[in-house]
Amino acid sequence: SRKPMRVLITGAAGQIGYAIVAMAANGDMLGQDQPVILHLLDIEPAKQALQGVKMELMDAAYPLLVDVVATTDLQEACAGVEVAVMVGGFPRKAGMERKDVMAKNVSIYAQQARALEAHASRDVKILVIANPANTNALMLKEHAPSIPAENITALTRLDHNRALAQIAARAGTHVSNVRNVIIWGNHSSTQFPDVAHGTVDGRPIREVLRGEEDAAWLDGEFVETVQQRGAAVIKARGLSSAMSAASSACDHIHDWFNGTAPGKWVSMGVYGDGSYGQPAGLIYSYPVTCQHGKWKIVQGLEIDSHCAAKLKASADELLEERELALACISE
Ligand code: NDP
């Protein structure tokens, strides 16, 4: 059987952590034939809860779960990991300035970058979930110059999956029949969920949903629903989305490692190269295909002027976040 892979999950005693450890141990992240050793990291105040998570993982007797390292020691957590899922971060608290939250996260991600660089496997693949996810990923990259930029990504797959689900419900079909929507830009309210190239059962979304009402829905309510879905879940559950965030993180890593099906693309926050006229050097969500453990930005899609303006607005926000983050470093 295959050699187990070491997977780091930070913030593992939190909400998303609680959901994602089960999925990773069950083969949803790396495949049903891939044994895993889970490295769970959390901070000192969460130490006891983290031990509880480890106990439950043992008790669940997952066939693919070889071992669990539960620790508050960053070096031990990073040792030899081939996958790192960064869920831990400083939460937005009432009354805090955006700059203060940014400063906390910049220092967390700088420290974790150095530890990953020093102790993780040389080809570690990293997914940042903690917000501001794109900018946290960028700061991680800045502080881990020896980790290839292409190995550092941010999660927009939840937004992508939310878009697929909304289209499927409207078209009255199963979500697996909807493909190739795109989330452009930042994992924030400036993201642009784009259906122009998507399909339902192989037919263009705008051909399937083409009545006047459907068209208005696609241009208005659909976009808002996807952008505001996180807030809607908080309102309903009294807690932020965790199971769906965890599941989409598994999809992200699964497709990155195992490839996307021919003709299918997914959205990932990746280190941009200037594609589609957006500034290079940002972690920006693009449509990508994956093969042999590498992602590639889908090229040559036609972008109309409305879409171009949306792409630019999200890039502008990311440039501003980068400024703010860099200012935190130099302070
Ligand atoms: P969650 O597990 O609910 O969320 C973790 C992070 O994921 C947050 O930054 C959250 O952003 C972000 N996130 C990104 N996308 C989504 C989404 N779609 N839905 C929900 N969240 C999303 O937070 P918990 O507070 O339950 O757990 C956090 C853990 O991190 C705790 O165990 C804590 O101890 C640990 N922690 C670690 C630190 C460190 O490593 N130094 C520092 C602080 C905490 P948002 O804040 O915008 O909701």
Image (cartoon, rainbow, N blue to C red):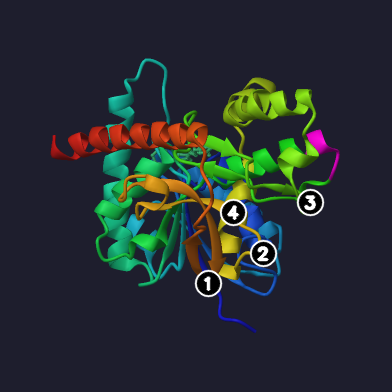
Q: Residue at x 33, y 24 (%)?
A: 98
Q: Is residue 11 left or right of residue 23?
A: left
Q: Element type at marker 3?
A: helix
The residue furthest top is 95
Compared to residue 302, the image places residue 62 above or below, namely below
Query: Cα distance, mark 1 to mark 4?
Result: 24 Å
Mark 4 residue type: Val
Instruction: Choose between 65 and 264: the one closer to the eye.
Output: 264
- Closest to the camera, between mark 4 and mark 2, is 4
Counting residues from the N terminus, which is met first, the one under dot 2 or under dot 3?
Answer: 2
Query: Cα distance, mark 3 to mark 4?
Result: 14 Å
| Mark 3 Cα-neighbour bin, 10 Å: few <14, some 14–19, many ≥20 | few
Tell me the residue that label 1 is attached to: 5
User: Magenta residues, as a range?
Assistant: 168-173
Residue 136 in magenta stretch: no
Query: Cα distance, mark 4 to mark 2?
Result: 20 Å
Mark 3 residue type: Asn
Query: Cα distance, mark 3 to mark 1?
Result: 32 Å
Query: Cα distance, mark 2 to mark 3?
Result: 23 Å
Residue 296 at least partly seen: yes
Query: Cα distance, mark 1 to mark 2?
Result: 11 Å
Q: Element type at marker 2?
A: loop
Tell me the residue that label 3 is attached to: 177
Q: Quadrant of the C terminus?
A: top left
Report x, y in % for residue 178: 74, 48
Residue 266 disc label = 4
- Closest to the camera, between mark 1 and mark 4, is 4
Q: Residue at x 66, y 62 (%)?
A: 263
Tell me the residue that label 2 is attached to: 27
